[in-house]
Amino acid sequence: MSILVYIEHADGAIKKTSLEAVSFAHALAQQTGGGDVVAVGLGTIAEDQLAKAGEAGASKVLYVKDSNLDAGVIQAHADAVAQIYEKVGAETLILATSSLGSAVAARLAVRLQAGLVSNVVELPDLSSGYQVKRSIYTGKAFAVTTVDTAHKILAIKKNAIDLKTDGATASVELVSLDIAQANFATTITSTDQATGEVLLPEADIVVSGGRGLKGPENWGMIEDLAKVLGAATGCSKPVSDIGWRPHHEHVGQTGVKVAPTLYIAVGISGAIQHLAGVNSSKYIVVINKDPEAPFFKAADYGIVGDAFEVLPKLTEAIKAVI
Amino acid sequence: MKILVCITHVPDTTSKIQFTDNNTKFDKNGVQFIIGPYDDYALARAVELKEQLGASLTVLNVGEADTEPTLRKALAIGADDAIRINAFPKDSLFVASEIAAIAKENNYDLILMGRESIDFNGGMVHGMVGQLLGMPSVSPVMKLDIEGDTVKMAREIEGGKEYLEAKLPLIAGCQEPIAEWKIPNMRGIMSARTKPLNVIEPSQNQSATAVVEFKLPPAKGAVKLVDKDNVEELVKLLKNDAKVL
Ligand SMILES: Cc1cc2nc3c(=O)[nH]c(=O)nc-3n(C[C@H](O)[C@H](O)[C@H](O)COP(=O)(O)OP(=O)(O)OC[C@H]3O[C@@H](n4cnc5c(N)ncnc54)[C@H](O)[C@@H]3O)c2cc1C
């Protein structure tokens, strides 16, 4: 049995969530007594980057080197992955739950007649059928779900598995595909993307600010701490609604759902809709001047105090130890 | 121009999530149901497009009779008519194939829905409907304008956005800030009572997955508070206890 993994890249590097998907596939292959883990990369990716998929557990990487696929045109990517899936004779497709991944997976589920489960948080339980645990209600619960089809697609949630880094180098094989023009019916005219920044949905540490910071001019404090920690910056919904921060930083029920090892919330009250976006964090630190702020109930560590006083001190103290 | 907006009927975002029947059913006790927040954005944008371009606007939900108040609310917000596919929405494929069957009969130019439902968070239905109908699907869309038969959109990607264009017909999964949520006014609420709400039996009955059990995450322990004048203590805890630095 072969497992195919669809990997995404940003700025020419494979995304960490995609490498986690490879590690997930590797562990799944082990669980079912071996089998190939084949990763597929689309667009223009450096070959040494593709080899990283080997370290994460892929036995082979198929590289569809086609600049038409550099842009994440959903239908074209879905068509390419479907063709590869059939070529490889795979029975399972693994990918990361992401903006592009989820959109591609949905189309593939219909095309490949595969049962699709997204936000998967653990390896499947194969002891009685095929049971997959996924996160639902925006992280507030889990559903154990059976997949009743021969072909299966699992979209993995960030941090569902430890990233494997000790795999052997994988061979990279170039594949050319014929992707019908109809799949390029949506044209990407431009992109507007922060480069060189840590991507919020992928970040291991997130420093987030809320309305308690009073104005966009005070975000320097958040950025300083984020820089020291190599963290991404986030914000609450009102902060992006008023335009203090860009929309893609908005964390919560209606924004980005993060799953870092450390989430630091500064001047955010902790409304239930904000918590819905951070409840998969491993550790939460809250800095708020109101001891009654609901966020403290969801936090591991907290400081009751004025952010303007506490934050610069904290940044200095962290600088001193790392 | 014909627009279809597909809406979910989901627990209010402040609901306590609990399960009954041996953790096999969602506990509706005391829970308020709403139009999914993402679907609500889609609906708001559709109402704007209707006013701007003179379109007809249908809302659809796959659900049992208890979802009708949610459909009535969508009618009050500005939809012209509603369709309820009378079935429990078993999984994404089930919902998508029923939507696709209705769409095939009615030739909508634009099908909008939320990027994902806030109960199961699948984010799959728009893509599945797109594949079933052979139409492009785009998600998550944060801006959508129509000029002639061209749709201009912005789609959120990790760390930014991407601008795209496509021709109608098209399916989009929406999110903010595509439009501001609309609150129904008195006139809307009155007129919603007499707008058509058609109940149709499911015709496809397809599904590929099933939930066998729900689980809740373990309760969080109490917060450890550190004095504001002793931030070094917090750094120590993060470094030595949590081991995250
Ligand atoms: C359907 C729906 C969906 C929503 N989705 C989201 C979502 O995705 N994400 C989201 O964030 N919100 C969301 N909201 C909004 C949410 O309910 C809250 O309104 C919002 O999270 C509050 O943002 P905030 O904590 O920044 O601001 P506030 O609630 O105003 O809190 C500011 C906090 O800062 C503290 N503070 C003030 N000054 C200082 C200081 N000097 N130092 C330290 N602390 C200080 C205050 O004590 C307070 O706790 C949603 C709401 C609805 C109805």
Image (cartoon, rainbow, N blue to C red):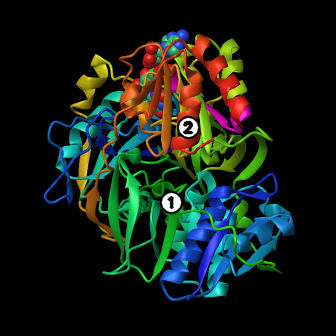
Q: Are marks 2 and 1 on the same chain?
A: no
Q: Residue drawn 37% across and 44% down?
A: B7
Tell me where residue A147 appears, x and y as whole percent.
Answer: 38, 74
Picture quadrant where residue B57 is located: top left
Q: Amino acid at mark 2?
A: Leu
Residue positioned 44% across, 46% down in the render: B4
User: Tag on residue A232?
Assistant: none
> In this rendering, which labeled residue sits more in front, label 2 or label 1?
2
For numbered disc 2, what is the local secondary structure? helix
Q: Which residue is mark 2?
A: B238
Whether A29 is drawn above or below B78: the answer is below
Percent coordinates x, y for residue B120 in the rendering: 37, 52
Judging from the image, what secondary structure is the residue with disc 1 in?
Answer: loop
Residue at image mark 1: A160
In the image, residue A230 lies in the stretch drawn in magenta: yes
Viewer-proximal residue, B15 or B5? B15
- Residue located 82% across and 57% down the image: A12
Closest to the observer, A308 or A250: A308
**Is residue B78 visible in the rendered structure shown here?**
no
Residue interval drawn in magenta = A227-238
